[in-house]
Image: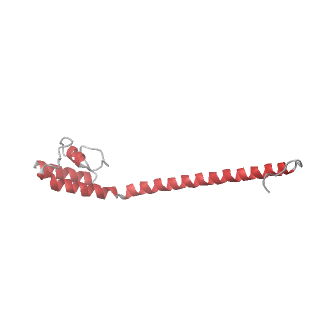
């Protein structure tokens, strides 16, 4: 097996989520493919013509992996929790507003009990 075939095999293993040298679920990029192939980090270089096809394949697979349904579910759950949090903050603000209006009404009633107070606004 040639060196470039090692890299392609490593890419296939990472894509199928069955790596040998790295933990499962490892993101796919140039460095992880190199490590999975048993090479050093940074051994896949854009300047080497041998790696042009491999690099483009890695980029395409990593873009596809970003739209993974589990990632989308995680993002959806995160956005739902943010929505619930903002709804709770909104309701808390409304409750404070109502409490302040109620307190204002009580104070205005108490103020009307005194005869010697002249209103500022008419």
Q: Picture coordinates of residue 103 (x, y %)?
A: 75, 49
Between residues 18 and 89, which one lies in front from this camera angle?
Answer: 89
Q: Picture coordinates of residue 77 (x, y %)?
A: 46, 55
Using the rendered view, name the quadrant where residue 61 is placed. Answer: bottom left
Residue for point 21% across, 56% down: 57
Q: Residue furthest left?
A: 2
Residue for point 85% across, 51% down: 112
Going by the image, does 73 lie left or right of 61?
right
Residue for point 70% across, 53% down: 98
Going by the image, does 90 lie left or right of 39?
right
Residue for point 20% across, 56% down: 56
Between residues 78 and 108, which one lies in front from this camera angle?
Answer: 108
Between residues 71 and 87, which one lies in front from this camera angle?
Answer: 87
Using the rendered view, name the quadrant where residue 73 is placed. Answer: bottom left
Q: Residue furthest top?
A: 40
Q: How is the image coloured?
A: secondary structure
What is the number of callouts on the image?
0
> In which quadrant of the rendered image does the C terminus lie?
bottom right
Q: Picture coordinates of residue 58 (x, y %)?
A: 23, 54
Q: Picture coordinates of residue 34 (x, y %)?
A: 20, 45
């Amino acid at each position: 097996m040639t060196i470039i075939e090692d890299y392609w095999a490593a890419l296939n293993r990472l894509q199928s989520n069955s790596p040998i040298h790295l933990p499962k679920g490892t993101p796919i990029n140039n460095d992880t493919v190199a490590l999975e192939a048993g090479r050093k980090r940074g051994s896949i270089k854009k300047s080497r013509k041998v790696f042009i096809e491999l690099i483009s394949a890695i980029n395409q697979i990593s873009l596809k992996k970003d739209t993974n349904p589990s990632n989308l579910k995680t993002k959806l759950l995160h956005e739902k929790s943010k929505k619930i949090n903002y709804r709770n903050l909104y309701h808390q603000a409304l409750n404070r507003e109502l409490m302040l209006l109620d307190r204002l009404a009580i104070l205005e009633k108490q103020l009307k009990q005194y005869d010697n107070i002249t209103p500022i606004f008419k």
